Image (cartoon, rainbow, N blue to C red):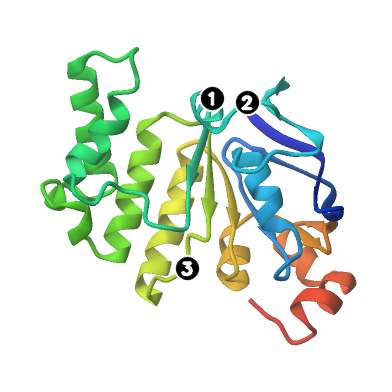
Amino acid sequence: MAILKAEHLAKSYSGRKVVSDVSLEVESGKIVGLLGPNGAGKTTSFYMIVGLVSRDEGTITIDGEDISLQPMHNRSRMGIGYLPQEASIFRRLTVYDNLMAVLETRKELTKEDRQDKAEELLDEFNIQHIRDSLGQALSGGERRRVEIARALAANPKFILLDEPFAGVDPISVIDIKKIIKHLRDRGLGVLITDHNVRETLDVCEHAYIVSQGHLIANGTPDHVLNHEHVKRVYLGDQFRL
Protein backbone atom coordinates (compact mmCIF):
# COMPACT_ATOMS: atom_id res chain seq x y z
CA MET A 1 0.00 0.00 0.00
CA ALA A 2 1.33 3.42 -1.00
CA ILE A 3 0.87 6.49 1.22
CA LEU A 4 1.11 10.14 0.19
CA LYS A 5 1.62 12.39 3.22
CA ALA A 6 1.73 16.14 3.68
CA GLU A 7 2.88 17.16 7.15
CA HIS A 8 2.81 20.60 8.78
CA LEU A 9 2.59 22.52 5.50
CA ALA A 10 2.88 26.30 5.74
CA LYS A 11 2.93 29.08 3.14
CA SER A 12 3.07 32.87 3.34
CA TYR A 13 2.64 35.58 0.72
CA SER A 14 3.98 39.07 1.44
CA GLY A 15 4.17 38.26 5.13
CA ARG A 16 0.61 36.96 5.33
CA LYS A 17 0.32 33.29 6.27
CA VAL A 18 -2.24 31.61 4.01
CA VAL A 19 -1.51 28.04 5.15
CA SER A 20 -0.42 27.12 8.66
CA ASP A 21 0.36 23.60 9.88
CA VAL A 22 -1.84 21.62 7.45
CA SER A 23 -1.33 17.84 7.45
CA LEU A 24 -3.15 15.16 5.48
CA GLU A 25 -2.61 11.73 3.99
CA VAL A 26 -3.93 9.70 1.10
CA GLU A 27 -3.64 5.91 0.95
CA SER A 28 -3.91 3.57 -2.01
CA GLY A 29 -7.52 2.69 -2.73
CA LYS A 30 -8.94 5.65 -0.81
CA ILE A 31 -10.82 8.78 -1.93
CA VAL A 32 -9.99 11.87 0.11
CA GLY A 33 -11.52 15.34 -0.08
CA LEU A 34 -9.77 18.63 0.73
CA LEU A 35 -12.42 21.29 1.31
CA GLY A 36 -12.97 24.69 2.83
CA PRO A 37 -14.38 28.19 2.29
CA ASN A 38 -13.03 30.48 -0.43
CA GLY A 39 -9.65 31.84 0.60
CA ALA A 40 -9.26 29.17 3.27
CA GLY A 41 -5.91 27.90 1.97
CA LYS A 42 -7.16 24.59 0.58
CA THR A 43 -6.09 25.33 -3.00
CA THR A 44 -2.65 26.50 -1.88
CA SER A 45 -2.29 23.32 0.20
CA PHE A 46 -3.35 21.23 -2.79
CA TYR A 47 -0.90 23.02 -5.10
CA MET A 48 1.97 22.50 -2.64
CA ILE A 49 1.33 18.75 -2.81
CA VAL A 50 1.13 18.81 -6.61
CA GLY A 51 4.31 20.89 -6.87
CA LEU A 52 2.78 23.99 -8.45
CA VAL A 53 3.52 26.05 -5.33
CA SER A 54 6.63 25.72 -3.15
CA ARG A 55 6.10 25.22 0.56
CA ASP A 56 7.77 27.39 3.20
CA GLU A 57 7.57 24.73 5.89
CA GLY A 58 6.58 21.10 6.18
CA THR A 59 7.24 17.92 4.24
CA ILE A 60 5.57 15.94 1.47
CA THR A 61 6.42 12.25 1.22
CA ILE A 62 5.51 9.18 -0.81
CA ASP A 63 6.07 6.00 1.19
CA GLY A 64 8.42 7.91 3.45
CA GLU A 65 10.53 9.40 0.63
CA ASP A 66 10.70 13.19 0.90
CA ILE A 67 9.58 14.83 -2.35
CA SER A 68 9.14 18.33 -0.91
CA LEU A 69 11.88 19.87 -3.08
CA GLN A 70 11.14 17.88 -6.22
CA PRO A 71 9.77 19.76 -9.24
CA MET A 72 6.37 18.81 -10.56
CA HIS A 73 7.66 16.60 -13.39
CA ASN A 74 9.73 14.54 -10.95
CA ARG A 75 6.73 14.13 -8.65
CA SER A 76 4.84 12.82 -11.67
CA ARG A 77 7.53 10.21 -12.29
CA MET A 78 7.42 9.27 -8.60
CA GLY A 79 3.71 8.54 -8.73
CA ILE A 80 1.64 11.74 -8.49
CA GLY A 81 -0.85 12.21 -11.31
CA TYR A 82 -2.49 15.63 -11.56
CA LEU A 83 -5.65 16.68 -13.36
CA PRO A 84 -6.04 20.48 -13.51
CA GLN A 85 -9.40 22.22 -13.63
CA GLU A 86 -8.64 23.74 -17.03
CA ALA A 87 -8.70 21.64 -20.18
CA SER A 88 -5.31 19.94 -20.39
CA ILE A 89 -5.56 17.72 -23.46
CA PHE A 90 -3.83 18.64 -26.70
CA ARG A 91 -6.62 20.19 -28.71
CA ARG A 92 -5.11 19.46 -32.12
CA LEU A 93 -4.25 15.83 -31.41
CA THR A 94 -6.62 12.89 -31.62
CA VAL A 95 -7.68 11.08 -28.46
CA TYR A 96 -5.37 8.18 -29.35
CA ASP A 97 -2.42 10.50 -29.94
CA ASN A 98 -3.11 12.28 -26.64
CA LEU A 99 -2.64 8.95 -24.87
CA MET A 100 0.44 8.08 -26.90
CA ALA A 101 2.03 11.45 -26.11
CA VAL A 102 2.18 10.38 -22.45
CA LEU A 103 3.01 6.74 -23.11
CA GLU A 104 6.01 7.80 -25.22
CA THR A 105 7.60 9.16 -22.04
CA ARG A 106 7.59 5.70 -20.45
CA LYS A 107 10.92 4.42 -21.71
CA GLU A 108 10.50 1.09 -19.91
CA LEU A 109 7.76 0.15 -22.38
CA THR A 110 8.33 -1.19 -25.88
CA LYS A 111 6.48 0.32 -28.84
CA GLU A 112 4.08 -2.63 -28.79
CA ASP A 113 3.55 -2.24 -25.03
CA ARG A 114 2.64 1.43 -25.52
CA GLN A 115 0.17 0.63 -28.27
CA ASP A 116 -1.39 -2.14 -26.17
CA LYS A 117 -1.66 0.18 -23.16
CA ALA A 118 -3.35 2.85 -25.26
CA GLU A 119 -5.92 0.31 -26.45
CA GLU A 120 -6.53 -0.85 -22.87
CA LEU A 121 -7.17 2.72 -21.71
CA LEU A 122 -9.49 3.42 -24.65
CA ASP A 123 -11.50 0.35 -23.67
CA GLU A 124 -11.38 0.97 -19.92
CA PHE A 125 -12.75 4.50 -20.18
CA ASN A 126 -15.20 3.77 -22.99
CA ILE A 127 -13.57 6.17 -25.45
CA GLN A 128 -12.79 3.81 -28.33
CA HIS A 129 -15.55 5.44 -30.40
CA ILE A 130 -13.81 8.84 -30.21
CA ARG A 131 -10.23 7.60 -30.62
CA ASP A 132 -9.82 9.54 -33.89
CA SER A 133 -11.59 12.70 -32.69
CA LEU A 134 -9.53 15.81 -32.08
CA GLY A 135 -9.32 17.11 -28.53
CA GLN A 136 -11.04 20.35 -29.51
CA ALA A 137 -14.12 18.43 -30.74
CA LEU A 138 -14.89 16.66 -27.45
CA SER A 139 -17.75 17.39 -25.06
CA GLY A 140 -16.94 18.29 -21.45
CA GLY A 141 -17.65 14.77 -20.23
CA GLU A 142 -15.63 13.15 -23.02
CA ARG A 143 -12.72 15.49 -22.37
CA ARG A 144 -12.67 14.58 -18.68
CA ARG A 145 -12.61 10.86 -19.54
CA VAL A 146 -9.71 11.38 -21.93
CA GLU A 147 -7.82 13.52 -19.41
CA ILE A 148 -8.18 10.87 -16.71
CA ALA A 149 -7.16 8.10 -19.11
CA ARG A 150 -4.14 10.17 -20.13
CA ALA A 151 -3.19 10.75 -16.49
CA LEU A 152 -3.29 6.98 -15.94
CA ALA A 153 -1.05 6.44 -18.96
CA ALA A 154 1.80 7.70 -16.76
CA ASN A 155 1.09 4.84 -14.30
CA PRO A 156 0.61 6.96 -11.14
CA LYS A 157 0.07 5.72 -7.60
CA PHE A 158 -2.08 8.75 -6.77
CA ILE A 159 -4.26 11.08 -8.79
CA LEU A 160 -4.98 14.62 -7.61
CA LEU A 161 -8.14 16.13 -9.07
CA ASP A 162 -8.55 19.91 -9.10
CA GLU A 163 -12.23 20.91 -9.34
CA PRO A 164 -13.33 17.76 -11.26
CA PHE A 165 -17.02 18.75 -10.96
CA ALA A 166 -16.59 22.33 -12.20
CA GLY A 167 -18.33 23.31 -15.42
CA VAL A 168 -19.94 19.95 -16.14
CA ASP A 169 -23.63 19.11 -16.41
CA PRO A 170 -25.45 16.89 -13.87
CA ILE A 171 -25.20 13.77 -16.06
CA SER A 172 -21.45 14.27 -16.41
CA VAL A 173 -21.13 14.74 -12.63
CA ILE A 174 -22.65 11.29 -12.13
CA ASP A 175 -20.24 9.90 -14.73
CA ILE A 176 -17.22 11.53 -13.10
CA LYS A 177 -18.19 10.14 -9.69
CA LYS A 178 -18.31 6.66 -11.20
CA ILE A 179 -14.87 7.19 -12.73
CA ILE A 180 -13.45 8.39 -9.39
CA LYS A 181 -14.75 5.24 -7.69
CA HIS A 182 -13.25 3.20 -10.52
CA LEU A 183 -9.87 4.83 -9.86
CA ARG A 184 -10.18 3.86 -6.18
CA ASP A 185 -11.11 0.29 -7.12
CA ARG A 186 -8.07 0.23 -9.40
CA GLY A 187 -5.97 0.80 -6.27
CA LEU A 188 -5.12 4.45 -6.73
CA GLY A 189 -5.24 7.00 -3.96
CA VAL A 190 -7.45 9.93 -5.00
CA LEU A 191 -7.30 13.47 -3.59
CA ILE A 192 -10.05 15.90 -4.64
CA THR A 193 -10.36 19.61 -4.04
CA ASP A 194 -13.57 21.18 -5.31
CA HIS A 195 -16.03 23.96 -4.53
CA ASN A 196 -18.85 21.47 -5.03
CA VAL A 197 -19.00 20.32 -1.42
CA ARG A 198 -22.02 18.06 -1.85
CA GLU A 199 -20.61 15.97 -4.68
CA THR A 200 -17.15 15.77 -3.11
CA LEU A 201 -18.45 14.59 0.26
CA ASP A 202 -20.76 12.15 -1.50
CA VAL A 203 -17.87 10.41 -3.25
CA CYS A 204 -15.03 10.65 -0.71
CA GLU A 205 -14.41 8.39 2.28
CA HIS A 206 -12.38 10.87 4.30
CA ALA A 207 -12.40 14.66 4.24
CA TYR A 208 -10.09 17.39 5.50
CA ILE A 209 -11.61 20.82 6.14
CA VAL A 210 -9.38 23.92 6.05
CA SER A 211 -10.42 27.36 7.28
CA GLN A 212 -8.25 30.48 7.55
CA GLY A 213 -5.19 28.43 6.69
CA HIS A 214 -5.70 25.89 9.46
CA LEU A 215 -7.00 22.34 9.43
CA ILE A 216 -10.15 22.50 11.54
CA ALA A 217 -11.56 18.99 11.10
CA ASN A 218 -10.98 15.68 9.38
CA GLY A 219 -12.79 12.38 9.28
CA THR A 220 -15.62 10.65 7.50
CA PRO A 221 -18.16 12.80 5.62
CA ASP A 222 -20.66 12.21 8.44
CA HIS A 223 -18.13 13.34 11.02
CA VAL A 224 -17.29 16.62 9.28
CA LEU A 225 -20.96 17.28 8.49
CA ASN A 226 -21.74 17.14 12.20
CA HIS A 227 -18.65 19.02 13.35
CA GLU A 228 -19.76 22.22 15.10
CA HIS A 229 -16.81 24.33 13.94
CA VAL A 230 -17.30 23.18 10.33
CA LYS A 231 -21.00 24.04 10.50
CA ARG A 232 -20.25 27.43 11.99
CA VAL A 233 -17.65 28.62 9.47
CA TYR A 234 -18.41 26.60 6.34
CA LEU A 235 -21.50 24.44 5.89
CA GLY A 236 -24.14 26.04 8.10
CA ASP A 237 -26.79 24.19 10.08
CA GLN A 238 -29.07 23.27 7.18
CA PHE A 239 -26.55 21.54 4.89
CA ARG A 240 -27.42 17.92 4.05
CA LEU A 241 -26.02 15.39 1.60
On screen, residue 170 versus residue 241, left or right, reads left
- Indicate which disc residue 31 carries: none
Residue 14 drawn at (x, y percent): 81, 53
Q: Residues within 10 Å of mark 1 (few under 14, many from 20)?
A: few
Residue 130 drawn at (x, y percent): 15, 52
- Indicate which disc residue 166 carries: 3
Image quadrant where residue 71 sits: top right
Point 72% across, 35% down: residue = 5
- Indicate which disc residue 70 carries: 2
- Camera-nearest residue between 20 and 168: 20
Q: In which quarter of the image is the N terminus?
A: top right
- Indicate which disc residue 74 carries: 1
Do the residues under discs 3 and 2 have CB atoms within 8 angstroms?
Answer: no
Q: In this view, does 168 lie above or below 132?
A: below
Q: Which residue lies furthest to the front in this view?
A: 14
Q: Is residue 206 above or below residue 239?
A: above
Do the residues under discs 2 and 1 have CB atoms within 8 angstroms?
Answer: yes
Measure the alpha-carbon separation of dots 2 and 1.
6 Å
On screen, residue 83 versus residue 56, left or right, reads left
**Which mark sits nearer the N-terminus, 3 or 2?**
2
Residue 43 drawn at (x, y percent): 66, 56
Residue 193 drawn at (x, y percent): 61, 57
Measure the alpha-carbon separation of dots 3 and 2.
29 Å
Point 46% across, 60% down: residue = 177
Point 80% across, 38% down: residue = 56
